[in-house]
Image (tube, grey):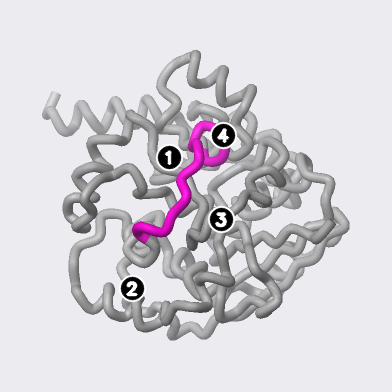
Amino acid sequence: MNRPNILVSANSTYVMPLAVMLTSLFKNNSAQIDVYLLWSELSAADLELLERLVLSHGSRLIPIEINQEVFQGAPTLKYISRETYFRLLAADYLPSAIGRVLWLDADIIVNGDIMPFYNMDFDRNFVVACSYGDPMRETIHKNCQSLGFPDDKTYFNAGVMLCNLEAWRTLDIHAMIANHLSEGRKLQFPGQDLTNLLFHGHVKIVDYKYYNSMIHCICDKEDLRFAHENAVIIHFPGEAKPWRFHDLPFSDVWAQYHEHCPFGGQPLRRTSYFKLKAAFNRMQRGT
């Protein structure tokens, strides 16, 4: 069986979350894995730590340095860094023999076997990914309107993305990226919106509840039970990160993987997300 190819990126802030994500990946997948790391601002110590982690699980880390000028000036947010755009260059930087690669954000945990997802047929699409659940439907619908999409059914979350590199290599992605960024339109979710603009109409959508279970779509005990029993990938998008807050869905599971990663000896200083959110809402109301 061919070794699965995983694509990741990180800056110095996200080395710890990336180590947790990789630990969860290896804990739940016995296959030897090739991990391609796109980076531009990591230290030698960061790279050595990640390489030791990957090697300790019988897998390979292939670091690929990206010029610091790449994507300079691209729109970012507090929780969306320049590195999130690097995935769009996968067809350029990964070996030409690689036809598929699975992109995984650092703010996820892998809680099961990724191979059924990794081996999915592309059905001639550029990407296999997950759309959003009902709790985000209104937000995503409005965003799709601003992007000029006729509907929101194929707008996908780009944090988990199976990439058809054979198909990507038929595109002039550099020109497409430059064209979209030059339009100067306001992107609500910058890296993700750009990714959707590039591949809109050529996306195979699969069920987010299994392969990209976003915590803000886990709204009640039944959702939480289903995710614990079935979700292969749990995602913490936005500002609600498990290394900052202890009371998010799956924060406890994330912490267990943290204990087994190279940063496990460092205590987590976490607060309550819901208390912080309630305090913010009171401030907004002036009460």
The mark nearer the N terminus, 2 or 3, is 2
The residue identified by callout 1 is 240
Q: Secondary structure at mark 4?
A: helix
Which one is earlier in the sequence, the residue at label 4 or at label 1? 4
Q: Mark 2 falls on what kind of element?
A: loop
Between discs 3 and 4, the one toward the N terminus: 3
**Which quadrant, please, contains the N terminus?**
bottom right
Residue 265 % position (x, y)? 74, 44
The answer to whether the residue labelled 4 contacts the one labelled 1, judged by CB atoms less than 8 Å apart, is no
Asked if disc 2 and disc 3 are in contact, CB closer than 8 Å, the reply is no
Q: Residues within 10 Å of mark 1 (few under 14, many from 20)?
A: some
Residue 119 makes an appearance in the image: yes
Residue 184, by quadrant, is bottom left
Which of the two discs, 4 and 1, sits closer to the camera? 4
Taking the magenta stretch, the answer to whether it contains residue 210 is yes
Distance CA(mark 2)–CA(mark 4): 31 Å
Tell me the mark number nearer the camera, choosing from 2 and 4: 4
Specify the amino acid type for callout 3.
Phe
Tell me if residue 77 can be seen.
Answer: no
Mark closer to the observer (1, 3): 3
Side of 173 where 190 appears, left or right: left
Dot 2 or dot 4, earlier in sequence: 2
Pick whichever of labels 1 and 3 is earlier in the sequence: 3
Q: Secondary structure at mark 3?
A: loop
Mark 2 and mark 1 in contact? Answer it, CB < 8 Å: no
Residue type (three-letter) at the residue carrying disc 2: Ala
Say which residue appears at 64% left-offset and 77% top-offset: 64
- Examine the rendered structure and indicate whether residue 5 appears above or below residue 208: below
Residue position marked by numbered label 2 in the rendering: 74
x and y percent of residue 81 in the render?
A: 42, 64
